[in-house]
Amino acid sequence: MVKAVIPRQRTPSSAEPGYPDHDPRSRPDGIGWVTRAVFPGRGVRITVGADRGDGLRYAVVPSLDAARFLLPLPNRRVTAASVLAYNALRPPKVRAFRAVVGVLARTGLLALTRAPVLTVEGGPLLWDHLAGLLKTGPLHAAIGIRPPDPHHKPTLQLFDDGGRPRGYAKIGWNDGTRAMVRREAATLAALPPPEGDFPAAPRLLVHTRWQDREIAVIEPMPRDVRRIRKPDAPRTAAMLAVARRGGSAGTPERFDESAFLAGWRRRSAGASMAARETTVEDAIDALVARDGGLGLEFGDWHGDWVPWNMARRRGSLLVWDWENHGEHVPVGFDLAHQAFQTALSTHGRPAAECAAAVDEALARHGAALGVTNPRFVADAYLIELWLRTYELSGGGAGWNPRLHPALLRVLAERLTLTAPSRGKI
């Protein structure tokens, strides 16, 4: 029986105590957690209301209760650039909305949107620290707002006084997200050059710590990047180049003798200790019993290979968000991940249907990656995904309710384990 007990977690949407009611950092919603992460400390004062003209000013778009953006208001060029830069990468509806807001900002008519103004006074502020490291002169930050989620990292788009993009700053603010920022910084510093089918990636500009935040600043993307065509179609040549780091095929290894399996054993033991019961170990044992003697090619994977993390430029592929990069995994994991996450995030399918999408993708495209055992790769990917979900839960996050406990139930059925009764997983 596959079973797990969910460890106690702090509610990710809980407001942080100690801020006045009028301070948005006291809120439990998206603008609350983002402002707590970006503006830590009692030395910073934040108010929302009438435009007083003091301190840093941001337009809260479209409204305080449905905030999606904090648009800096130092001058028209910066404000317009905040919504118009890289607009060609956005979905059509988002692109149209941003275009309208950008025109209003450029012409000085943003007040027509009736967006409330958020004012920040005091400091220190993160982008002042980054401006010193980047040697750019004053910087201004456009801040995206997402729903509260301890897996998410605030991302700041940085502009100079003339509205020129200067980089993207990712903020790791809890144990899990700090580790992800460190991993991405290390990965970008070590990637091979974009030769042959290996995709281009934005360069790392700065990796630093600031007020217990882990910060990575990534270079801005080229202005001529565009959305990829046929986003559901896997770019198997690029996936394979990433798996082999732009080189040749690796020597096959037996699954039951691999460092990959040894790593799983360590990670699953930690999960069992935290839950005080077995978690995913039964699924690993079943996979070893079925496929332990398989000879597999192991390699790297991007770790979050999805259409919204890539773009095209002059016929070449540009891929970003390398924070989940890993080494020595079965070749084919990126293909499995694209299929699963597209089904989950784009189409809203339940975990069982997402797993079926993985099977279909590997059956259709696995041969292009040299995958000769698509069923193994699919089941191994689902185990890896559950372990990742567990590890995120232990880094200050809660469980993703769309994946746990549903993913363990899917694995129990696929590996013909005794199906657990409802509520026992």
Image (cartoon, rainbow, N blue to C red):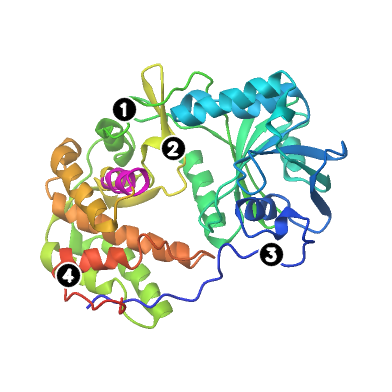
Residue 416's label in the rendered image is none
Specify the segment rendered in magenta. Answer: 336-347
The x, y position of residue 364, in whole percent, is: 14, 39
**Mark 3 against mark 4, which lies toward the viewer?**
3
Which of the two labelled residues, at mark 3 and mark 1, occupies the earlier sequence position?
Answer: 3
Q: Is residue 339 magenta?
A: yes
Residue 191's label in the rendered image is 2
Secondary structure of the residue carrying tag 3 is loop
Q: Amino acid at mark 2?
A: Leu
Question: Residue placed at 19% from the left, 59% from the top?
Answer: 255
Secondary structure of the residue carrying tag 4 is helix
User: What is the C-alpha distance between the residues marked 1 and 4?
Assistant: 36 Å
Q: Which residue is mark 4?
A: 286
Dot 1, crowdedness within 10 Å: few (<14), some or many (≥20)? some
**Mark 2 against mark 1, which lies toward the viewer?**
1
Q: Amino acid at mark 4?
A: Ala
Q: Which residue is mark 1?
A: 197
**Mark 3 against mark 1, which lies toward the viewer?**
3
Residue 16's label in the rendered image is 3
**Residue closer to the observer: 203 or 54:** 54
The x, y position of residue 270, in whole percent, is: 40, 74
**Mark 1 against mark 4, which lies toward the viewer?**
4
